[in-house]
Amino acid sequence: MKLLALDTSNQPLSVALMDDDQLLAQTTVTVHPKHASYLQPIIESLMTSVHLEPEDLDRVVVADGPGSYTGLRTAVTTAKTLAATLNIDLVGISSIASIAANVFTEGQLVTVLFDGRNDKVFTGLYRIQNGVPVQVIADQHTAFDQWLPQLAATGEPVVVLGDLANFRDRLAAELKTNFMSLPAIMSIPQAQQIGRLGLNMTPVANINGFVPRYLRLTKAEADWRQQHPEEDSGNYVEKV
Amino acid sequence: MERNLILSFESSCDETSVAVIENGDHILSNIVATQIKSHQRFGGVVPEVASRHHIEQITSCIEDALTEAQVGYDDLDAVAVTYGPGLVGALLIGVTAAKTVAFAHHLPLVPVNHMAGHIYAARFLKPIEFPAMALLVSGGHTELVYMAEPGKFEIIGETRDDAAGEAYDKIGRVLGINYPAGKEVDRLAHLGKDTFDFPRAMDQDDSFDFSFSGLKSAFLNTTHHADQIGETLSREDLAASFQQAVVDVLADKTVRALREFPVKQLILAGGVAANLGLRERLTTELEAFDQTELLLAPLKLCGDNAAMIGAAGYVFYNQQKFGDASLNADPSLEFDWLASGATV
């Protein structure tokens, strides 16, 4: 199975091409903020480098959130359009799991923090089992001070990846020797990891309905729902 | 002539649209998923909400457009897409999807300026003859555009502050009309009289520029003052007075531009081109211009849609103006100004 994997959830951009579990090619760029300009050229040059044509692809795997809203939409739009237009499989993988999958220590707890500003984080907790991250606490958008006690409550060593700058001191103080930090490169998504995770997963049934998992409403939407608790927040878009 | 088919995309604001256009002038399908109901909850377009809706809709719109047109990817010659101006996050969905389809099916990609698209809505009426001029009036733009030849668009005048459509939405709010207010203000205006004599900004100015913020302020001051003294003003007369001022300024500047730049056609396009008061007035004014034909963009194609992008895209396709995989959204994309001193 020829598989294309994409992750543009945050500042790094990573694209991988795989043939089953064998990596054919991968490019990871950490310095370009404009994924919209760079993603498609990188996909095309990787495909050319391994002599693949779009119609050779069988499956697209994409990191579908949480993360930067615009970043998520870049890879998810590419992935869902490619899957729909070529009539091939689409699989979404948590952007948190994408990075947690960099860890291979069996049984290890891993959390990943995406700084959501105002001391909020997008995060989740995983355990490495049979070489893949298995969810222990669901991905969520939460205040860091509410997340930290949940990590401490595990009573186990926890590898913490992602944006640590604003949280390192509190992690060290609260988790003490259970706070495991790894070299920064372990926090960079490598698309081959979501390719590996998505290889055998059941593809999404409804490609048209596939959207990023933002894990956070827009402020306008949240305010509106609060003011209109009785209203159905359902379908506001209509084809005319 | 060989049949040319373009799959076109538009997602610059609050409509996700995909169309299939044959030979640049025939609509095989034009799917428009509008988000108006969603943004009405907030009294105007919320950009992040718009982006989220676009990604929900995009592939289903592609599928519907191809199905309705009864064509497959193998039948297509190119993919055209709006890359600006507009909301950056919204534009990116269409641009990304269009690039992906072009790549997947080995098709050329044609980037289209959204405003050129609005002008080419008139192409579905009849061929555009050059030189031509367009009065483009929408929620984000108000400009006079000179077109010396196909694919060439030069601004000769534009708004210095609010766009006309923006002014409609703002005074609509005061009249208790939800966004987009244009249609309802237009309806009320036809029931009232111009009794308030609001200012016609820059009407005596030599430039072809417009200004609507003074008119908007005069309107708001009038209604605010009436509120304070407990007086109730006629909504119909307020709407009629506002609309008359807008139409006077647009018509006077356009007539002046037509005298200085004789053209074969004047095209009225953009969302506000659906305004009946403006259509009626320009129709009357153009009676004095024997050599200039008035093309009113079809009412159904005045709002944002991908059909118009396909029509403009066909022109650029024939000129081989292709984009590549690095095409990005350009939220503040603009036509160039007509070079000063240029002879026409």
Image (cartoon, helix red, strand yellow):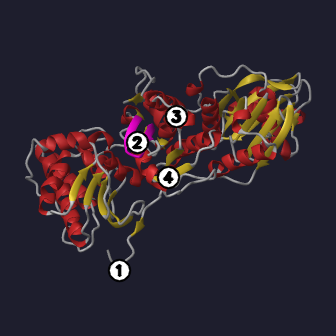
Q: Determine the chain carrying the residue at label 2.
A: B
Residue found at x 31% / y 65%:
B131
Q: Mark on residue B143?
A: none
| Label 2 packing within 10 angstroms: few (<14), some (14-19), many (20+) | many
Question: Are circles 1 and 4 on residues that touch, CB within 8 Å?
Answer: no
Q: Mark on residue B58?
A: 3
**Which is nearer the N-term, disc 2 or disc 1?**
2
- Look at label 2 and name its amino acid: Ala
Mark 2 on the same chain as mark 4: yes
Residue found at x 23% / y 63%:
B254
**Which is nearer the N-term, disc 1 or disc 3?**
3
Q: Residue B327: where, in percent of width, then height?
A: 59, 52
Q: Mark on residue B341?
A: 1
- Look at label 1 and name its amino acid: Gly
- Look at label 4 and name its amino acid: Tyr
Mark 1 on the same chain as mark 4: yes
